[in-house]
Image (cartoon, coloured by chain):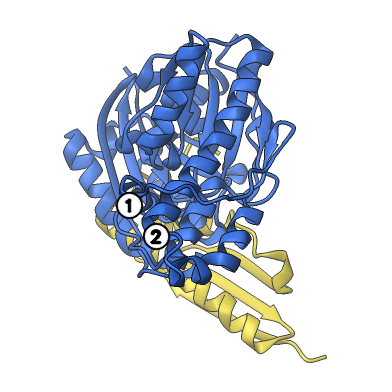
Chain colours: A blue, B yellow
Amino acid sequence: MTIAIGFEGSANKLGVGIIRDQDVLSNVRHTYITPPGEGFLPRETAQHHRECILNVLQKALDEAKITLKDVDVICYTKGPGMGAPLTVTALIARTVAQIYNKPIVAVNHCIGHIEMGRLITGSVNPTVLYVSGGNTQVIAYSRQRYRIFGETIDIAVGNCLDRFARLLKLSNDPSPGYNIEQLAKKGTKLAPLPYVVKGMDVSFSGILSYIEEHLSGWLNSKEFTPEDLCFSLQETVFAMLIEITERAMAHVKSSEVLIVGGVGCNEKLQDMMKVMCEERNAVLHATDERFCIDNGVMIAVAGLLQYKTQGHTSWAETTCVQRYRTDDVHISWRE
Amino acid sequence: MSTFSVNLSIPFPSGREAEIAYQVLRVDREPSRGSIAKSLTLDNNLLQISISGTEARKVRVALTSFFDSLILVTETIQLFGPPVPTYNYY
C-alpha cells in the first residue's frame, strides 16, 4: 500500500488531498473568494494560501487519520497556473519532504484532472473535455501523450463566465459559474451572441466584448434580463464546446467522454453533453464539485502514477512553471 | 549606476533546520524581469542571504518575498517538526 499526499494551489483554490493506492482518504479545500465585481490577483491569492495552508494540511491529515510520517510520497502542482500561488504550495511540499525525508513528485495540473477523472468515473480511454477558469482543451490519448485536439485561442471558458459574472456583479460565493447556472434556470429569451468555433479551436474573448458593449442597452431597454443573459451565454459557449468535443470523438472513433475542470460541474453543460453522447451511442463520465473543482486529491492521483513508473522528481527540479502544456508530459503509466 | 544591497545572517536553533530552510528556499529562481541578484549560503546554523539590484524598490520587494517564504518554512518546521537528520531524495 502506498500513501500519497497532493498539494494544489495553482489558482484561487487551495487543496490538500490524501490517497491510499486508489482510495481517497481525505480531500480538503479552501477557496479564496473575492467580493462581487472583483477577480482574484496573484499576490492576494498567494497571501490567502500562505495563511490557510498549514490548517488545510492539518485538517487533511486528521480526516485521513494519519500523520506525515505515514505518507510515502509528496506530490505538488508544478504548473500551469499563477506563479505566486503555485510557489506557496511547492514551498510547503519541499519543507515537509525535508522534515520527514520523503520523495517528492512534481505534477502537471491538467494531467491531475484527467487521471483523477479516469479513476473516479472508471472511464478507460475517454475523449476529455477539460474546462476551467484557466484552461479549455479537448484532449485524446495517443502513444503516451494526452494530445490536444482543440483548445481556446484566447481566454478560457471559465474565465469568460467569471468575467461575465463580474459585469453583472454576481457573487463569487461559492463560485461565479455556479451563480450564473442558477440564474440561467430562470432565463427564457435567447440573446444573439457570437458563436466562435474556428476549426477545432474556440474563442471566448469576442463574446465577452460583445456582451460588454451591449449590456447596459439590453438591461435598460428590458430587452433581456440578467437571467436571460446567463441562459444565453451558457447555451452559446457550451454549444461551442460540445461541437468540438463531438468532432474530436468522430476523429478518434471514441465512445466515451470525460468532462473535467471546474466548469465541468455545471449540470447544464453535463446535460447538453449527455444529449450529444446519446445521439452517438457514447457514454458520458462526469464528476461533482468535490472532484471537478481543483483539489489536492487529483495531484496525489497523478503524482502516485508518475512516482510508480518514473520515481521521484530531482530536488533541483521541484520548481514551479506558469506555462506547462498538457502534451508536454510523457504518460509513462499508460500503454 | 549604484547598486543597492541587503545582507542578512539568520540564525536557526540547529544546523539541520538552517539546512532545510536553505534547501527549500534555494530552488525557486527570482523572476528574471526583476533584475535582482539573490544568493543564499549556509554556514552551520546560519542562513545567509544577499540580495542586490540597481533599483531600491525591487530590492525591497525581493526581501519582502524572501521573508514571506522564510516565515512559512519556519512555521511549518515548528508545527510539523522536529526534522529527521538527513534527506535522501536529492
Quadrant of the image containing the N terminus of chain A: top left
Can I make out residue A311 in this image? no
Mark closest to the chain's N terminus, 2 or 1: 1
| Rendered residue at 46%/70% (across/down) | A221
Q: Residue A51, relative to residue A254: is it above or below? A: below
- Could you say which is closer to the camera, residue A119 or residue A160? A160
Answer with the quarter of the image where residue A128 lies.
top right
Q: SS class of the residue under badge 1?
A: helix
Can I make out residue A84 in this image? yes
Question: Looking at numbered disc 2 in the image, what kind of residue is underneath it?
Answer: Pro
Mark 1 — residue? A183
Question: Looking at numbered disc 1 in the image, what kind of residue is underneath it?
Answer: Leu
Label 2: chain?
A
| Rendered residue at 40%/39% (across/down) | A101
| Rendered residue at 50%/71% (across/down) | A216
Residue A226 — which label? 2
Q: Residue A20, relative to residue A207: is it above or below? A: above
Residue B53 — which label? none
Tell which residue pokes out farthest to the right in this image. Answer: B1
- Could you say which is closer to the camera, residue A303 or residue A250? A250
What percent of the width, then of the height, locates residue B39? 64, 68
